[in-house]
Amino acid sequence: MIQRQDIVTGIAGAGIGVVVNLLGGFDILLQALIVAVCIDVATGFGKAVSAKDLNSNSAYWGGLKKVSVFFVVALAVVLDRVVATYAGENAPQALRTLTVGFYLGVEGISILENVSAMGVPVPTPVLKALTFLRDRSAGTPEGRQP
C-alpha cells in the first residue's frame, strides 16, 4: 500500500526536478548561486538586527527579489535552448553562465556590504574579484548596463 509520505516525497522530488531543469541543471554555478543567496539573506537579517531595523516589509520585498533572480536565470536557460534549437547545434549555456555569474557578483558584493555594516572587515581582493565578476558579466566594457 502506498503511504502518504511516499506520495509527498514523490511530488516533492518531481517538483524539485522540474525547477532544477528550468534552472539549467544543478551544476556548481547554480549551487554557488544558491549558497550566495542564502548567505546574503542571513547576513542581511544580521545587518537589520544589528541596526535595529528589522521589519517584515523589507523582508518580503527582499525575498521577492531573491526569487526573481531565479526567474531571470530560468529565462536565460530558455533563451539558450531557443538559440541552440535554431542554430542547429548544441550551443553552450552562454546566457545562463553570464546571468549566474552576474548574480554571483551582485550577491557577493551584497554579502560584503552586509558584513561590513556589522563591523566585519572586508578583504579588498575579495571585493575586487566580486566587482570584476559582476562587471564582466554585465556585458559592457565598463561593466555597466547600457
Image (spheres, helix red, strand yellow):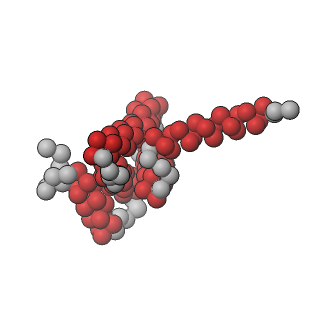
Work out whether 116 lies above or below 60.
Answer: below
- Identify the residue at the far right of this view: 1
State the image quarter where residue 136 is shown: bottom left
Q: In this rendering, does residue 104 appear at all?
A: yes
Look at 57% across and 41% down and name the residue there.
Answer: 16
Residue 20, percent from left and from top: 50, 44
Number of marks in the rendered image? 0
Q: Is residue 27 above or below residue 9?
A: below
The N terminus lies in which quarter of the figure?
top right
* Image position of 104 (left or right of 128): right
Identify which residue, 102 or 2, lies in the foreground: 2
* Rendered image quadrant of residue 61: top left
Q: Is residue 120 above or below residue 54?
A: below
Figure quadrant of the C terminus? top left
Q: Nearer the viewer, residue 69 or 89?
A: 89
Q: Quadrant of residue 124?
A: bottom left
Instruction: Give the x, y percent position of residue 4.
Output: 78, 31
The residue drawn where x is 40% and y is 40% is 74
Near-viewer residue (113 or 101): 101
Residue nearer the viewer, 74 or 107: 74
The location of residue 31, given as percent across then percent down, is 48, 54
Residue 46 visible in this rendered orientation of the protein = no
- Picture coordinates of residue 5, whole percent (x, y): 77, 36
